[in-house]
Image: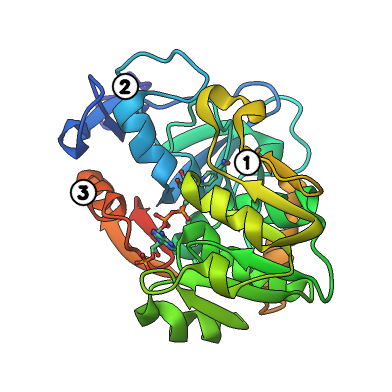
Amino acid sequence: MVLSDRTDVHVTTTMKAISQDRPGGPEVLRVIEKERPTAGPAEILVRVQAAGVNPTDWKTRTRGFFYHDETPPFTVGFDVAGVVEEVGPGVTVLAPGDEVFGMPRFPRPAGAYAEYVTGPARHFARRPGGLDAVHAAALPLAGLTAWQALVDTAGVGPGQRVLVHAAAGGVGHLAVQIAKARGAHVIGTASAAKHEFLRGLGADELVDYRTQDFAEVVGDVDVVLDTLGGEVTERSLRTLRAGGTLVSIIPPAGFDSSLMPRRDGVRVTWMLVEPDRAGLTELAALVDDKQLEVVVDSTFALAAAADAHRLGEAGRTTGKIVLEVSG
Ligand SMILES: NC(=O)c1ccc[n+]([C@@H]2O[C@H](COP(=O)([O-])OP(=O)(O)OC[C@H]3O[C@@H](n4cnc5c(N)ncnc54)[C@H](OP(=O)(O)O)[C@@H]3O)[C@@H](O)[C@H]2O)c1
């Protein structure tokens, strides 16, 4: 669409975005031109510089949105870092030109694999000064998951023993550092090649899950962050001390918590991450204090989103994958 009737001025209101017409493999992701969204009341419009890639993106690509009947065509993606382009009526906390990061609307569609997104202003926060857009886009969903699980749900504190599964992954590498920043003793599971990396992030003990049963060698744990589910949840229960907590981020069948494995004397719960300005601000403070390093495994152009998904779905990344959208 062209707003001006002057022939020499073309103000486009369209944008590039990734879209899919049907559920399926990475090949369903393609670039389209679509109408740029506008900020509604209490919302901001963000020009996206980078979009983080998360497992929930390929799960959505394959199966649709969790909890919501959103039929294709739709645009996947939740994590963004960018610049506020416009603010809607009533927004007081952000202004055009502010550099922000966030995970708007989750688990409703956010459409983050695009040149522009909108979202409630308070689903974003100012991006930490020490992070470029790529690293800021890697942080919201994985970082908030780790923060909300360890701090808000389990209340991790000094001296506690915390077991983080898939410690080298997107959630795991941030969880290791958040637990360390809370004064905990951190045990991680990862393949041996990633142990040195994790020691560099502060992990105290590491278990090579490929050669050792962590449940045989880890015990007296206060908090388990379960990023894997299934039989890992069952075995993790054996590592907990009486009164300990297991927080799983893998939903039980039908999202029914009563179907989770149990053990007397320990708390077992699953958790779904929420948009959270306060949590983003806490994460930004940890970054500014140099207590939290965001590790990016690989970057891809927006148009190469399918390749980003192929890499992510292989399940071996260290840290995060990010799409570079604009400068
Ligand atoms: N409920 C929620 O709100 C929520 C939020 C965020 C994520 N999640 C879910 O949490 C899961 C993890 O997300 P993520 O972003 O951290 O994934 P990710 O970055 O894709 O995880 C990749 C990592 O997993 C490790 N890994 C794979 N199998 C392992 C095993 N058996 N033991 C230990 N490590 C293993 C790999 O290390 P190796 O190469 O060493 O195997 C790799 O470093 C996903 O299923 C995601 O959908 C849920």
Instruction: Kindly identify which residue carries mark 1.
Output: 273
Residue at point 58%, 44% (across, down): 249
292 lies above or below 10? below
Contact (CB < 8 A) between labels 1 and 3? no
Q: Residues within 10 Å of mark 3 (few under 14, many from 20)?
A: some
- Helix, strand or loop at mark 1: loop
Counting from the top left corner in percent of width and height, residue 195 is at 45, 82
Kindly indicate the quadrant of the structure image that contains residue 242: bottom right
Amino acid type at mark 2: Val
Q: How far apart in space, not on screen, are marks 2 and 3 (Cα)?
A: 28 Å
Colouring rule applied to residues: rainbow
Q: Secondary structure at mark 2?
A: loop
- Classify mark 1 as within 8 Å of ligand 1 or not, answering yes or no: yes
Quarter where residue 157 is shown: bottom right
Is the shortest distance between ligand 1 and the CB of mark 3 under 8 Å? no
- Position of residue 110 measured from the top left corner of the image (x, y, whole percent): 49, 31
Q: What's the mark number on residue 2?
A: 2
**Marks 1 and 3, Cα distance to the nearest angstrom?**
27 Å
What secondary structure is marked by label 3? Answer: helix
Image quarter of the N terminus: top left
Task: Determine which quarter of the picture holds residue 292.
Answer: bottom right
Q: Earlier in the sequence, mark 2 or mark 3?
A: 2
